[in-house]
Image (tube, rainbow, N blue to C red):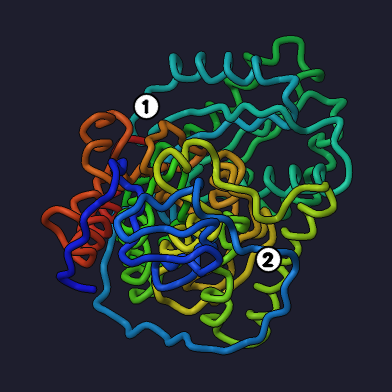
């Protein structure tokens, strides 16, 4: 249909769809070359196509067959960035001291310690001192509690942390003695522990320990590091109809560039793979990885059904307003972030990444949970695409990538990179190369 003219029959908002040909009731509606649902009624050529005349085609648990069509990416020229080499062999892009409460009960103490530490210890070689507040660590059971402990252990070993003060209370389920089994070996100069109930003045004791970490971390310097050491998380939130056309494909092309240089990317938001999952399954490097991907998808579907929720839940109100019609529509746009590389690994929630290349991670679409999951699995940076705009960030640098130039201009204080130029004066390949170089520069803004 290249070059064909279509006369619109009504006003259609930016980022929304219109029919390129007549579609009869019950026929599939095609976008990205795949079905995004069925027409609920006859749709005329040039008509607005959205939730009023399209319904999802998704159902329940499916049976899948491995039909491999993925090809390894050809290696490309090496690239470097300035990072921090850690004693455990990992590489960080930040040199920060983290204060990690083991339970929400000491959140206020942690924030007080953060404020006092910044007064006492000048920032410079140590780029920031941050307390990560949360409501967890006690009154949890089963997998919920287990995952919290795994997240704490992963944070303690994260390469962006020059050192960590683990701040316990003393009576919580995730107390420090329990956590030691999850933490394993650690650098005693860089990781310190204290329980608030054990000290008359917990703030002063904490500052004493942070001083010891600060002394060890103050000698850290950025050194040239190969791009193969980068682990980049990929996430979208507040999407619009352009997200799957500009921002997500640009991130997918970025992923291919990084992987071609030996690096690693992680894709999550499992429910937003529903309807596009076979694309990822058929790119799995082998049948064992395919079976893990099937389990990843079906485990999430079973989670929904166990809680009496529909598997094919519509996109959020903001997504619909931005032009996304069905879950398939969002999923086919979301998975654009995976690029074209083979799927090399499948991770459980809070499982550290092991395989270089493209990995799939079990986590929901929720921005907070999914982005945290990317970070604790080892991502030093998260690329966060958005068409609606969001100030959200997680515990690692979170680069907001807009799908359209209007948003990039209106929310320049939120947006780091404008992929909307792809529909104006830039190819996907040009935008991806620019984004790759931007990431290598490790922008100074933490969030």
Could you say which quadrant of the image residue 68 lies in?
A: bottom right
Image coordinates of residue 209 in percent, x first then y, are 61, 27
Image height check: is 430 above or below 94? below
Q: Quadrant of the C terminus?
A: top left
Q: Nearer the viewer, residue 365 or 259?
A: 365
Nearest the viewer among 44 and 89 is 44
SS type, badge 1: loop
From the viewer's perspective, is 17 left or right of 367? Answer: left
Asked if 212 appears above or below 202 in the picture, the reply is below
Is residue 73 visible to us here? Answer: yes
Q: Which residue is mark 1?
A: 123
Is residue 267 visible in the rendered image? The answer is: no
Front in this rendered view, residue 181 or 354: 354
Report the residue at 27% width, 63% height from top. 80
In front: label 1 or label 2: 2
Image-based side of 177 in relation to 277, left or right: right
Q: Residue at x 26, y 44 (%)?
A: 404
In the rendering, at what x and y percent does residue 239 appear? 42, 45
State the SS at label 2: helix
Disc number placed over residue 43 in the picture, else none = none
- Residue annotated with mark 2: 297
Contact? badges 1 and 2 (CB < 8 Å): no
Mark 1 closeness class: few <14, some 14–19, many ≥20 residues within 10 Å:
some
Instruction: Indicate whether 133 appears above or below 16.
Output: above
Q: Position of residue 320 (x, y in %)?
A: 47, 42
């Amino acid at each position: 249909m290249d070059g064909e003219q279509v006369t619109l029959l009504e006003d259609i908002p930016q980022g929304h769809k219109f029919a390129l040909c007549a579609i009869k009731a019950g026929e599939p509606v095609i976008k990205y070359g795949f079905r995004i649902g069925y027409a609920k009624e006859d749709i005329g050529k040039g008509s607005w196509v959205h939730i009023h005349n399209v319904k999802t085609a998704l159902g329940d648990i499916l049976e899948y067959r491995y039909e491999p069509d993925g090809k390894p990416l050809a290696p490309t020229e090496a690239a470097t960035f300035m990072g921090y080499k850690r004693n455990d062999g990992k590489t960080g892009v930040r040199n920060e001291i983290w204060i990690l409460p083991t339970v929400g009960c000491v959140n206020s103490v942690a924030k007080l310690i953060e404020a006092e530490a910044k007064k006492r210890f000048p920032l410079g070689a140590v780029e920031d001192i941050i307390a990560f507040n949360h409501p967890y660590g006690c009154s949890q059971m089963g997998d919920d509690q287990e995952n919290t402990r795994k997240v704490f252990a992963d944070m303690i070993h994260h390469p962006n942390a020059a050192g960590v003060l683990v701040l316990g209370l003393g009576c919580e389920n995730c107390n420090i003695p329990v956590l030691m089994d999850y933490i394993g070996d650690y650098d005693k100069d860089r990781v310190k522990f204290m329980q608030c109930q054990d000290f008359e003045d917990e703030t002063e004791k904490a500052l004493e320990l942070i001083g010891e970490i600060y002394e060890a971390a103050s000698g850290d310097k950025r050194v040239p590091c190969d791009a193969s050491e980068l682990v980049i998380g990929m996430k979208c939130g507040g999407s619009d109809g352009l997200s799957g056309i500009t921002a997500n494909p640009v991130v997918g092309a970025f992923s291919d560039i990084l992987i071609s240089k030996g690096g690693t990317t992680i894709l999550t938001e499992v429910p937003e793979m529903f309807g596009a999952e076979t694309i990822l399954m058929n790119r799995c490097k082998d049948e064992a990885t395919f079976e893990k991907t099937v389990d990843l998808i079906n485990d999430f579907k079973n989670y929904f059904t166990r809680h009496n929720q529909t598997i094919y839940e519509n996109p959020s109100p903001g997504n619909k307003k931005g032009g996304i019609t069905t879950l398939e529509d969002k999923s086919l746009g979301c998975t654009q972030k995976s690029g074209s590389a083979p799927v090399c690994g499948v991770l459980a929630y809070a499982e550290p990444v092991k395989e270089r290349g493209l990995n799939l991670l079990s986590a929901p679409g929720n921005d907070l949970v999914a982005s945290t999951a990317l970070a604790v699995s080892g991502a030093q940076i998260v690329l966060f695409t958005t068409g609606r705009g969001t100030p959200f960030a997680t515990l690692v640098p979170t680069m907001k990538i807009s799908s359209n130039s209007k948003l990039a201009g209106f929310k320049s204080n939120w947006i780091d990179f404008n992929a909307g130029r792809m529909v104006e004066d830039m190819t996907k390949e040009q935008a991806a190369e620019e984004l790759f170089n931007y990431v290598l520069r490790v922008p100074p803004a933490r969030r």
